[in-house]
């Protein structure tokens, strides 16, 4: 017996009436930018390919092919193992470093934090390319070893190996883990540690039973961020790894490029993201949240005079911090130095200094066009993300949206998606609506992961505000618009500007997603990436130096705005 028509109509009316109209834009973005493209990814993975075209015949043939392919499982295992091991190495460096900055350092703590996380805002391409210059046969390491007599001839063992990929992945992971953990260390009350010591606990026991339970969840978050970045990275393996360093990200990219086998590439992407989800689920299960950190009592509590052990620990921590900073910045310094070198060979000693390579950039029409295109894309992405992210934050915070917490998590899903998979997802979503490759497609793809950044920053700020301020404004006769413009906006303006500046740097540096979307109209990072794949010219050093200067300027501007805002408060 069928459901009565009257009942069906009543049920439909109840569903419609339960939906807050204010939340419709959030649901629309969630459906079109997050859910639909991922559904298309799964749908495409069960289709077939014939003569270069997808055949709409549902089948598990792609998954059967993967299941029977020993080469695929070897490649998947290598990809996951390289990323996992690299992030573990990065955590081994970043965790004690965060302890030193968060618990030991007393002065200039903010400066030390910025020194560690600043490489995150420097072009990933620049950092990877710098390592290629260091590890190559004519690179810095070989030049030093040959000139010092340790090697008779340059060695090819340092580059295009899994070890070189592991090294660069660990280098990428350190800032992610550090920034996630340092805040947890800062918020541990000093009185809690003193109570542990007064109870007779040793330093190791205090760490095991107090510090570790309160910081391991943050460590898991930092590890997850680094793992998501490295496991979906195909730029580093293609530039550093060679054949022996091939990862599954490179294979997925090839399926949507030269091979033109989208169903098989989609199946690869689905298996990759499921594997990542399993590994990160295990990591979070092993690092459960224990205890609640409130305020920063530990920073304000008076400290006892230092003993010999404390002084030795401070000295060792300072040495470790200095070594890490040198490790993070040496590749960037080498790029900048060679951008002023007159030789076309990237080797020491540099014959003389010149501005020749910067002059060549001014006459490169293709580069200028790519730079203009990149600037236009970045501005559009920042505009779209700032407006939509701020609006969605206000809706989720004030709009009484059903399932607002679930919506917030779902909107942030692109941030938790490996870059290679997100690129594939955005291709499928934009192809469904016949959006041609170019600026529009690139803006949509980049906005999918830049908008959540603004959303989370503004939401975090809104949740710290006193809700009575808006109520008082409206009680005094102000309209909602007036209350927003004169009361709320000044208080969240810093978060909006911070999200815009961060979005600008993310867009200006983006390669993994953008490579799928630009087509024959590349942005500047894609143009540089293509130049490095097909041949090296010293002018690339000049491009990277200018990109680093722009990113550094954005970071300094953001810090200056934040400083003025704190001073005003």
Image: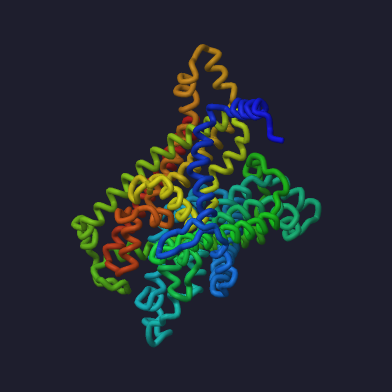
In this view of the protein, which residue sits in the foreground, 503 or 177? 503
**As displayed, is residue 500 above or below residue 67?**
above
Quadrant, the N terminus: top right
| Residue 394 horizontal/vertical position (percent) | 52, 30
Q: Looking at this view, name the residue that lies furthest to the front.
A: 1
Residue 140: image x %, image y %? 38, 73
Q: Is residue 235 visible?
A: no
In the displayed structure image, the side of residue 342 where residue 275 appears, left or right: right
Q: Position of residue 515 (x, y in %)?
A: 38, 57
555 or 76: nearer the viewer: 76
Q: Can residue 291 be seen in this view?
A: yes
> Coloured how?
rainbow
- Residue 534, image x, y percentages: 31, 68
- In the displayed structure, does residue 320 sit left or right of residue 341? right
Name the residue rendered at 57%, 27% in the picture.
20
How many numbered circles does the render carry? 0
């Amino acid at each position: 017996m069928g459901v009565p028509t009257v009942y069906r109509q009543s049920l439909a009316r109840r569903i419609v009436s339960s939906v807050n109209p204010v939340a419709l834009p959030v649901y629309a973005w969630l459906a079109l930018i997050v859910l639909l493209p991922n559904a298309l990814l799964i749908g495409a993975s069960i289709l077939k390919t014939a003569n270069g075209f997808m055949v709409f015949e549902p089948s598990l043939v792609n998954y059967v092919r993967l299941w029977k392919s020993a080469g695929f499982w070897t490649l998947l295992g290598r990809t996951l193992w390289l990323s996992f091991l690299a992030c573990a190495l990065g955590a081994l460096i970043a965790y004690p470093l965060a302890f030193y900055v968060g618990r030991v350092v007393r002065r200039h703590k903010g400066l030390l934090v910025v020194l560690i996380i600043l490489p995150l805002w420097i072009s990933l391409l620049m950092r990877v390319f710098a390592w290629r210059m260091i590890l190559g046969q004519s690179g810095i390491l070989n030049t030093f070893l040959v000139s010092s007599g340790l090697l008779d001839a340059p060695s090819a063992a340092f580059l295009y190996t899994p070890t070189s990929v592991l090294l660069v992945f660990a280098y990428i992971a350190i800032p992610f883990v550090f920034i996630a953990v340092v805040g947890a260390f800062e918020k541990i009350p000093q009185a809690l540690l003193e109570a542990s010591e007064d109870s007779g606990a040793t330093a190791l026991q205090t760490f095991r039973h107090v510090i570790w339970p309160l910081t391991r969840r943050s460590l898991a978050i930092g590890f997850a961020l680094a793992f998501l970045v490295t496991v979906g990275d195909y730029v580093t393996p293609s530039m550093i790894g060679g054949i022996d360093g091939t990862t599954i990200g490179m294979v997925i990219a090839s399926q949507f490029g030269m091979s033109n086998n989208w169903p098989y590439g989609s199946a690869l992407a689905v298996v990759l993201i499921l594997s990542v989800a399993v590994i990160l689920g295990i990591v979070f299960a092993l690092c459960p949240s224990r205890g609640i950190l409130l305020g920063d009592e530990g920073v304000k509590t008076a400290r006892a005079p230092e003993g010999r052990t404390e002084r030795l620990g401070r000295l060792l921590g300072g040495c470790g911090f200095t070594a890490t900073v040198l490790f993070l910045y040496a590749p960037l310094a080498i790029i900048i130095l060679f951008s002023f070198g007159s030789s076309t060979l990237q080797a020491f000693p540099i014959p003389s200094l010149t501005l020749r390579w910067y002059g060549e950039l001014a006459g490169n029409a293709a580069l200028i066009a790519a730079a203009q295109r990149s600037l236009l894309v970045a501005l559009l992405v920042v505009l779209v993300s700032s407006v939509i992210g701020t609006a969605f934050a206000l809706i989720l915070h004030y709009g009484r949206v059903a399932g607002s917490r679930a919506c917030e998590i779902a909107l942030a899903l692109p941030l938790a998606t490996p870059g290679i998979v997100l690129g594939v997802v955005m291709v499928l979503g934009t192809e469904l609506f016949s959006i041609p490759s170019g600026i529009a497609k690139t803006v949509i793809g980049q906005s999918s992961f830049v908008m959540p950044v603004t959303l989370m920053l503004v939401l975090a700020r809104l949740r710290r505000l006193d809700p009575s301020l808006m109520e008082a404004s409206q009680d005094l006769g102000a309209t909602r618009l007036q209350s927003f413009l004169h009361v709320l906006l000044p208080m969240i303006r810093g978060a909006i500007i911070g999200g815009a500046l961060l979005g600008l740097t993310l867009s200006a540096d983006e390669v993994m997603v953008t490579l799928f979307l630009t087509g024959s109209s590349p942005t500047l990072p894609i143009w540089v990436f293509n130049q490095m794949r097909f041949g090296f010219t010293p002018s690339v050093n000049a491009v990277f130096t200018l990109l680093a200067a722009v990113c550094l300027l954005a970071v300094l501007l953001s810090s200056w705005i934040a400083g003025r805002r704190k001073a005003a408060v």
